[in-house]
Image: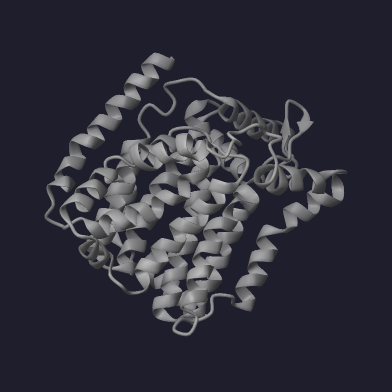
Amino acid sequence: MTFAREIYNNFCCKPDFKAFVFFLLALALVLPFQGSRPFVGRDEHRYPVVALEMLKSGDFLVPRFKGHIHLTKPPLTYWAIALGYKVLGKNPWGARLPNAVAFAVTVSLVFLLGKELWGPEEGKRAALFYLAMLVPFAAANVVTTDTILVLWETAALWAFVKGIREKRKGWFILMWSFWALAFLTKGMAMVPVATGAFLFWWFKRAEMPCPFHPLGLLIFFLLALPWYLYVWITIPGALETFWVEQIYGRLFSDIFHRNSKWYAPFYLYLPLLTLGALPASVVWVRSFFRSSWGAFKKALGEEWQALFLATLFGVPLIVFWIAKSRLPLYILPLFIPLALFTARLLPSSSRYLRFLVPWYFFLEVLKGVCARLIH
């Protein structure tokens, strides 16, 4: 009860005004032109159809695509799109609204996460750069599960850091609730990021409270597993579909033919993590050439925050790199530690912060041009 009262006081009575400002800023930048172009690509044609069939049939537990049972993803993304349809109508505006809102909330959470790691100035810079990065911004403008997944992962990481800093188990209970929502969004895809966080705790376990709270784990299972159990019991072959679609098929086999060659990450992931991280990658290059390696380390600090960012970035990257199934947005979670890393490298008085204003304008112009061309 004490923890519930603390949550109420923090978010209802004394909300962080800056986090709300970042939410509004991100929403203002990401919403324009969302419905000004038709659906493009397989997922943008498939996910909205599944959500529409849920609305027509009233069956929100068993996803169907053109009348056929479709278990490639858990249902939370379809539920979100169906809600978007209720709010803005059955059109591209409604289908893309959930990702726009998820991205805006994620920007706010990046601010809160940076604030917990180092302070409000670093939190502000991290949020501004995450909002500006090309890949996350582009992902927020299409129908995809990945932007919603990153929302829950970032929320879980924020609660994890709050629990570490305040040594309050209630934050870990909240963390497991967010991991459960991530599991309902994209199944086992949340495991690499969660593993990175828990590996960090393992390295620092002598100094930090244990995040594996029994009540938190119980909440995770109560939220994450009932849908899987229901589908497994009621639909023959569902368990095999989950195994092929979410584990074996993505990690160990080439059945989906998604950039499975060993060299694929070099042409797929490296450009996204460099050019796709613009303008933040400009800060990395500038810092690398103008600072010694010692100064680079000093910018991060030699405390637990540096190890936290390293495991958050390194563990998922290794998993995505060696997996046989590779798509561009699989690496979207990596842009969270990259934004935090950029915030730590950049002085608060840097001219690069002023450069972000015309960059945001450029993103809007780019969106308008794309909408015009695709339309």
Residue 105 in sight in this render: no
Percent coordinates x, y for residue 163 in the rendering? 45, 75
Residue 46 in sight in this render: yes
User: Residue 205, relative to residue 140: is it above or below?
Assistant: below
Left or right of residue 48: residue 99:
left
Left or right of residue 123: residue 320:
right
Percent coordinates x, y for residue 64 in the rendering? 73, 33
User: Residue 304, relative to residue 286: is it above or below?
Assistant: below
Q: Residue at x 40, y 53 (%)?
A: 336
Which quarter of the figure is the C terminus placed in? top left
Count how many numbered circles sit on residues in the image. Answer: 0
User: Residue 98, relative to residue 297: is it above or below?
Assistant: above
Percent coordinates x, y for residue 258 in the rendering? 61, 33
Q: Which residue is drawn at 36% across and 50% down?
A: 107
Q: Which residue lies furthest to the right in this view?
A: 236
**Viewer-nearest residue: 293 or 240:** 293
Q: Which residue is drawn at 59% across and 30% down?
A: 43
Left or right of residue 72: residue 233:
right
Percent coordinates x, y for residue 87 in the rendering? 51, 36
Left or right of residue 338: residue 124:
left
Q: Residue at x 64, y 65 (%)?
A: 220
